[in-house]
Each structure stands twice: as structure tokens, then as C-alpha cells.
Image: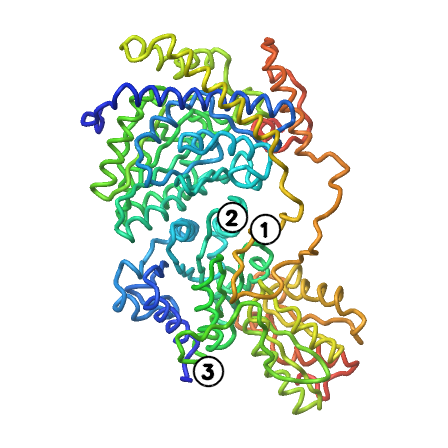
């Protein structure tokens, strides 16, 4: 194990897979000479050269489309989009093409393409650079969707994504790039898609946290234990397609209560979908309505004061967890 | 004439093969239209009748290892690449033996073995994908070229400029064939493009363009050949604008209010499957007997295709979820809300789309009877699906 930052873990995954397989190459805006908007790809141009680390013009839809074509021809492109908001410019290529080509052409061709992009609020980037759109991509059959929240998962999932035969939307989080964590050094250590992580075991309530919110949920669970005597189990699904529903259901059957925490919008969000799945498959085990904690239902505002209250923090998660137990926080504003 | 001077014509035998393929496409499209009128084919059906010279002239400039990328008007491109007519017709019928297993339909033909890399239903969506194929050839230092076809309407999509720029910037071996049939659906060229000389539209991005006569298979072949030769040897994108015309509507549900019968008649006088054999006969490369034989063989091939499509089974309901993902060891869990059982029965109400198809069948039937009845005389429903004509009028 080595202690790496999230961005370094991603870089290691890229470097190892590029060394392992000549077909792997990178495309994206400012990933080469500039080193990447979030410095994930720093140093890779020097090691692998311009053929394999390709700076692109600002043409998101076509960068993804070039990745699709190259993947259909047998290469394994990894495309970086600077933020998830920019991925909306590529929605046609991602949904109508990358996700559908294998199916609509009768299984004759494959699209082993990884599309990396960061999401998330907290940097005062306002309504066009701060959102969380994992629900939009998780909606689409044909895509795999990863939402790593730790350096180890960032590396293991990215390596699995690059080796996979399907198109993968790989959603990083802007606030996590500098987070440190233990990361396996074995170049063949992968994190399988469809395998959730139990971040903390507990018996009173299950808290599912998506992307960065897995960490918020873990801190909230610690605070619940410290100040409220509540034992919360925290689950990080790690991938939303495929979804490890079994691990979540097993936990809910044990705790009989569930809170879902996401940074994205509430309507049609990951939490709404998950709540429906749990209600359909574990209704008899529930002792309280499923609670959702989500980002505010609005375009992300710029002002720090407004931005801070527009996405979830520990107190909201704690309140929701206590609510499923019929309790109020011991001290409000916990 | 730039770019065409160095290209020799192939021997007469090859020219007769071109004609045979043009005739095959024509008969195939005519029968597909009939099968649509008989409700054997659903959805949209975009026929390339009138565009055979552009299809065959350009595709015959390719090597078997080159890639061909098409649009939503893709039957002819599959056929010219050698996909059996049976597989193309079965796809239109929605049958299991269709070249896309009945999942794609008219707009989404595919034959990877023959490097026909697909028809694409989103206008302009095929351009960056074609660029990616060309990128793979450059990346692996293979001597391949990609030929990407697009319509005049696609020149106004954002992907057009993006793809031209990227291909020129990265010096990719690709040729764009703009099949300019003068209309983007029902909107005339001069009503959708400020610069109507589409040949020039790539030049600001560093993609040189030439024009060819898309009704003349030889001119198309020579210009595209020259462009492909440059793309291959100089590793750079090229563009060829083929001026052509589709004799039938945009799709089968097209009342054709946007053009006059006189204009259609003028272009029909240049019908490539009339003018090309006449030229071959005049040059002594074909006689009337041989022409009749080619026509008869095209008819037979299409009859066989229809028989095959009729007999081919529909896809099994339990194949509904096949090929959404490539399943592997490292991916497990629940992909979707699949209930494991396909929905039984089917819709009891007519969808709007079905209604549109019905109108199309009426139009087709009227045209097929040879009556003077203009399709536009037919009543259209108040909210039809997907008609620019209707949108403009509402």
C-alpha cells in the first residue's frame, strides 16, 4: 500500500494501464502540456508522448465521438471532459451513440471507451460548473457508471473501467482530488464494478452515500455514534451501473431504516431510484419511511453563503438518520 | 477538374459491376417502398432512389480494408459494401437475420466484417465517429482511409466544424462525401445554408473540397478516388461534394410540398441508372442484351431478399435484453430494472408513430398506383411525428 492523493491514484491507474496496453491512449482538453485542469494527467505527456496523450480543441461532443470511433476500431481511449457540466455538450455521443451502438448494431461491435469527468459543488463555480449529474448517466442502459469516493477506489475502478469492454462514464469529484488514502500498489488490483463498499458497520440505520456524499455520510455516522449513541451503517455503492443492490438490501434488512445521501437534484435522482428499489424489494423490513438527503433543487449559486447551504453536510444527514428513529438531534445544529 | 486528372477508369467489366450494383440498389429501394406500403416495414424508411451513382462511385474508390460510415439513409451503403440484400431486407422487416439482428432498422445498418461501420440516425452524429476510425488508422500506422458520408443538412451541425478541425489538426486519413441532394429533409439548401457551395465549407478548417456530379458515377469515382489517394498518401482530410437528387420523398411520410413536380422531372431526366447504361452502350462496353440480363439479376436478387426476409423469424422475446452490455468477469450486480420477463402482449392503442406510418402507406400506395394524385393532397393528422413541413405550417 502507498498513501496517495485521489488525483495521484487516478494518474497511477492511467500510467499503469498505458504501460500495460499500447491501445490505451488519452484525449482531452488541456490534459497534455497544461497537465490537466485538475492535474490528474500531469507528467503523462512526458512519459507517453503526443500520440498517446492528446490535447484536444474545445469540442466535447466530437472528442467523445472520436473516442467511440477509435474504440470501435479496437483501441481503448480514455477521454477527459473538464467538468461534468461540459459532458452535456457530449450527451448525444454518450447516450445516442456510445451507449447504444453495441445493442443497435446487433452486438457486432463494441465501445470500450472511458469518459472521465469531475463533478460537484464547493468551489464557487456557479450554475454551469458545479453540478452532480450521476443520475442522468445512471439512467441510460448501455453505460457503466462509476462514482469513486476514495483514492483506492479511484485507482481500482479506473483500471477496471479501462479493461472493460463497455462504455464507462467515470465520475470523479472536484473536492476529492487532494484527499489522501491508502492505495494498493499491485498493478492488477482492480475494484470490480457492481460491488458496494461498507464504509462503516452499524445496526440502527443504513446510510447510502453517493460519490463525495459517502464521505459526508461516514463523518455523520461517526458523529451519530459520538453524540447520539446511534450505530449507523454506511454504504458506498461505488458504481451506479451496475448497482450492488444486494449489499444495500442486506443492510436495510438488518437495520430496518435507510437514509440516502446524494449531492445531485432530488427529482428523479439516484436517491429516488434507490428508494423505489428498496421499497419494492424490502418494504416489509422497513420500520420507517426511507429518507433522502439531496442537493437543493436549484441551479448552483455562486455566493459562498448560498452555495454552502445548497448541498448536504453532516448535520442534514444526522437529522435524517435520527428522523428514521423518531428522534430529534440532542442539540440542534449538530 | 482539380484532383480528377490522374485517375484512370477501370476496365469495362468493373464498370458493368458498378451498373449492376446501382441497379440492385434501385430495385432494392423500390421493393422496400412497396414492402413499407404493405406494412412489412415499420418506422421511418429513407430511400436513396436517385443517389445510386453517388453511392457506388464513392464506395468503389475504397479498398476492402477502408472504412465506410453512412447516415440514416444507409441501405445502399450496406449493399455497395457487399452486405447480402437478404440481411438488409430482413433488417427492414425487423427479423432476427437482419444485419443488426432487427434492433437497428432502416437507419442503423451495420456490417463490421465488411468495414461498413454503420448507418447513424442522428444527423451529424456519424462525423466524429468516422474521425475516430481514421484516428485509429493513424494511431496504428495502418494504410487505411475512412470515407464518411453526410448530407447537406449535416453541414450545419456543430459536429461538422468540430470534426473538420480535429481531422485537419491531427492530419487524419479521411474523406468526407457531402451528398448534397439540395434538401435537408424538406428545407431547401438555400433556406438552410448561407454558403450554399458546400465544397467550400471545410476549407476554413483546413479541409480542401471539390465538387463532383453525383448523378455521374464516373465523375464521382474519379473525384473521390483522387481525394482518397491524397488522404492516404498525405495523411490529411479531404471533402467531396456530390451534387445529387433524391427522386422520392425524404422518408415515406413526405408529402413533398417543398419542391415542384417540374424540378423532380428535370432531375429524373438525369437518372443515373438510365444515363450510365446509355453511356456504356454508346461506348461499346455494354449491349442491350447484357443490360436486360443485369436488370433481371437485380430483380431476382431483390425477390430473393424479400423471400428471405419473409421467412426469417422475428427476434425471440427472450433476446430482448441481449447485447446491452458485453458481460465480463469484472462486472457484476444489477445493471437495470430488468424484470427478466419481456412485457407480454404489446400496445392495444395505436401510437402516434403508427398513425404516421399509416399516412405514409397511403401516400406510397397513391404513388405506386401511378395516379396523378399528389401526396400533398392527402390529409395529414394535426400533430404528425417528425415533419418539418408540418412544423412550419403549425
Tally of numbered discs: 3
Instruction: Identify the colour scheme used.
Output: rainbow
Q: Disc 1 versus disc 2: distance between alpha carbons? A: 8 Å
C-beta proximity under 8 Å, tags 1 and 2? yes
The answer to whether tags 3 and 2 share a subunit is yes
Tell me the subunit letter for badge 1: B
Residue A107 - label = 2
Q: Quadrant of the N terminus of chain A?
A: bottom left
C-beta proximity under 8 Å, tags 3 and 2? no
Q: Residue furthest left?
A: B6
Query: Does residue A215 sit above or below B305 in this rendering?
Result: below
Quarter of the figure with residue A309: bottom right
C-beta proximity under 8 Å, tags 3 and 1? no
Quarter of the figure with residue B362: top right
User: Nearest the camera: A229 or A198?
Assistant: A198
Residue bearing the label numbered 3 = A181
Residue found 54% across the figure and 59% down from its top: B327
The answer to whether tags 1 and 2 share a subunit is no
In the rendered structure, which disc, 3 or 2, sits on the residue that comes first in sequence?
2
Amino acid at each position: 500500500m502507498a498513501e496517495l492523493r485521489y488525483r495521484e491514484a487516478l494518474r497511477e491507474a492511467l500510467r499503469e494501464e498505458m504501460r500495460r496496453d499500447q491501445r490505451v491512449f488519452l484525449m482531452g482538453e488541456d490534459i497534455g502540456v497544461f497537465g490537466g485542469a485538475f492535474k490528474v494527467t500531469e507528467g503523462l505527456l512526458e512519459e507517453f508522448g503526443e500520440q498517446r496523450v492528446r490535447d484536444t480543441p474545445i469540442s466535447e461532443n466530437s472528442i467523445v465521438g472520436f473516442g467511440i470511433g477509435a474504440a470501435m476500431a479496437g483501441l481503448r481511449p480514455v477521454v477527459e471532459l473538464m467538468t461534468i457540466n461540459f459532458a452535456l455538450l457530449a450527451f448525444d455521443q454518450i447516450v445516442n451513440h456510445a451507449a447504444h451502438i453495441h445493442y443497435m448494431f446487433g452486438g457486432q461491435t463494441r465501445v470500450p471507451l472511458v469518459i472521465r469527468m469531475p463533478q460537484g459543488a464547493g468551489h464557487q463555480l456557479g450554475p454551469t460548473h458545479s453540478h452532480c449529474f450521476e443520475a442522468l448517466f445512471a439512467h441510460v442502459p448501455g453505460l457503466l457508471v462509476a462514482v469513486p469516493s476514495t483514492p483506492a477506489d479511484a485507482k481500482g475502478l479506473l483500471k477496471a473501467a479501462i479493461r472493460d469492454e463497455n462504455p464507462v462514464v467515470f465520475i470523479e469529484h472536484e473536492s476529492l482530488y487532494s484527499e489522501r488514502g491508502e492505495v494498493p500498489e499491485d498493478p492488477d488490483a482492480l475494484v470490480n464494478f457492481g460491488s458496494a463498499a461498507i464504509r462503516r458497520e452499524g445496526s440502527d440505520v443504513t446510510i447510502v452515500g453517493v460519490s463525495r456524499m459517502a464521505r459526508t455520510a461516514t463523518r455523520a455516522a461517526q458523529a451519530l455514534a459520538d453524540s447520539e449513541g446511534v450505530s449507523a451503517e454506511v454504504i458506498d455503492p461505488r458504481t451506479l451501473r451496475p448497482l450492488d443492490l444486494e449489499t444495500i438490501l442486506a443492510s436495510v434488512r438488518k437495520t430496518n431504516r435507510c437514509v440516502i445521501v446524494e449531492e445531485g437534484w432530488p427529482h428523479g435522482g439516484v436517491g429516488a431510484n434507490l428508494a423505489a428499489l428498496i421499497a419494492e424489494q424490502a418494504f416489509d423490513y422497513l420500520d420507517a419511511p426511507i429518507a433522502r438527503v439531496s442537493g437543493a433543487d436549484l441551479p448552483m449559486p455562486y455566493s459562498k453563503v448560498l452555495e454552502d447551504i445548497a448541498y448536504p453536510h453532516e448535520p442534514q444527514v444526522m437529522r435524517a438518520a435520527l428522523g428514521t428513529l423518531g428522534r430529534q438531534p440532542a442539540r440542534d445544529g449538530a | 477538374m482539380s484532383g480528377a486528372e490522374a485517375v484512370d477508369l477501370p476496365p469495362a467489366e468493373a464498370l458493368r459491376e458498378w451498373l449492376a450494383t446501382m441497379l440492385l440498389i434501385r430495385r432494392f429501394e423500390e421493393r422496400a417502398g412497396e414492402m413499407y406500403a404493405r406494412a412489412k416495414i415499420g418506422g421511418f424508411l429513407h430511400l436513396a432512389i436517385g443517389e445510386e451513382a453517388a453511392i457506388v462511385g464513392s464506395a468503389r474508390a475504397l479498398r476492402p480494408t477502408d472504412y465506410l460510415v453512412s447516415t440514416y439513409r444507409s441501405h445502399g451503403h450496406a449493399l455497395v459494401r457487399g452486405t447480402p440484400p437478404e440481411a438488409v431486407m430482413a433488417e427492414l422487416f425487423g427479423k432476427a437475420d437482419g444485419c443488426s439482428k432487427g434492433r437497428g432498422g432502416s437507419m442503423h445498418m451495420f456490417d463490421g466484417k465488411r468495414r461498413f461501420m454503420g448507418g447513424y440516425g442522428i444527423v451529424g452524429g456519424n462525423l466524429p465517429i468516422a474521425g475516430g476510425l481514421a484516428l485509429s488508422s493513424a494511431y496504428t500506422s495502418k494504410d487505411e482511409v475512412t470515407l464518411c458520408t453526410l448530407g447537406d443538412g449535416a453541414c450545419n451541425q456543430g459536429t461538422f466544424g468540430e470534426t473538420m478541425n480535429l481531422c485537419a489538426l491531427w492530419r487524419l486519413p479521411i474523406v468526407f462525401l457531402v451528398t448534397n441532394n439540395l434538401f435537408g429533409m424538406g428545407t431547401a439548401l438555400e433556406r438552410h445554408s448561407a454558403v450554399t457551395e458546400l465544397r467550400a465549407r471545410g476549407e476554413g478548417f483546413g479541409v480542401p473540397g471539390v465538387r463532383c456530379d453525383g448523378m455521374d458515377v464516373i465523375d464521382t469515382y474519379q473525384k473521390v478516388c483522387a481525394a482518397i489517394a491524397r488522404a492516404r498518401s498525405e495523411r490529411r482530410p479531404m471533402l467531396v461534394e456530390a451534387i445529387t437528387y433524391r427522386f422520392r420523398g425524404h422518408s415515406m411520410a413526405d408529402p413533398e410540398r417543398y419542391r415542384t413536380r417540374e424540378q423532380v422531372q428535370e432531375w429524373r431526366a438525369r437518372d443515373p441508372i438510365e444515363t450510365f447504361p446509355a453511356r456504356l452502350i454508346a461506348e461499346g462496353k455494354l449491349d442491350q442484351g447484357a443490360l436486360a440480363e443485369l436488370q433481371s439479376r437485380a430483380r431476382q436478387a431483390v425477390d430473393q431478399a424479400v423471400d428471405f426476409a419473409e421467412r426469417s423469424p422475428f427476434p425471440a422475446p427472450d433476446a430482448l435484453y441481449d447485447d446491452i452490455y458485453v458481460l465480463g468477469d469484472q462486472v457484476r450486480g444489477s445493471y437495470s430494472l430488468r424484470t427478466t420477463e419481456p412485457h407480454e402482449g404489446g400496445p392495444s392503442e395505436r401510437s402516434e408513430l403508427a398513425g404516421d406510418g399509416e399516412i405514409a402507406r397511403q401516400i406510397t400506395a397513391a404513388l405506386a398506383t401511378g395516379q396523378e394524385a399528389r401526396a400533398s393532397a392527402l390529409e395529414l393528422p394535426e400533430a404528425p411525428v417528425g415533419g418539418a413541413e408540418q412544423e412550419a405550417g403549425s
